Amino acid sequence: MKCVVCKHGDARSGTTTVTLTRNGPTLVVKGVPARVCSNCGEEYVDELTTARLLEVAEQAARSGVEVEVRDYAGLESSPS
């Protein structure tokens, strides 16, 4: 896939770090599967992965987490 930002690089398989903040709680997830532009570094996270991240962020907010850092690999085995 061509990068929609720089229009020059190809987005290739890689990983990124996603930070989600809402009304106080912050969740940082490392090692998130993404497509990363070889030219500018723009990152693209697919719809299913994004849905999983938002679900986990909601669970963290409900549990009273202020700041939490997780690895994405651990999310894949967590119950929904």
Image (cartoon, helix red, strand yellow):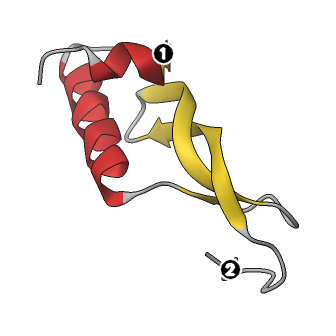
Amino acid bearing label 2: Lys
In the rendered image, the vertical position of residue 51 relative to residue 39, given as above or below: above
Quadrant in the picture for residue 38:
bottom right
Q: CA distance from mark 2 to mark 1?
A: 30 Å
Residue 18 x %, y %: 55, 39
Residue found at x 34% / y 38%: 53
Residue 23 x %, y %: 37, 40
Q: In screen coordinates, is 30 left or right of 74? A: right
Secondary structure beneath dot 2 equals loop
Residue found at x 27% / y 29%: 56
Q: In screen coordinates, is 71 left or right of 62? A: right
Q: In screen coordinates, is 61 left or right of 73? A: left
| Residue 2: mark | 2
Residue found at x 27% / y 39%: 52
Task: In this rendered view, identify the residue nearer to me: 21 or 48.
Answer: 48
Quadrant in the picture for residue 47:
bottom left
| Residue 57: mark | none
Residue found at x 42% / y 32%: 24
- The residue tagged 1 is 70
Task: In this rendered view, identify the residue nearer to me: 47 or 10.
Answer: 10
Which quadrant is the N terminus positioned in? bottom right
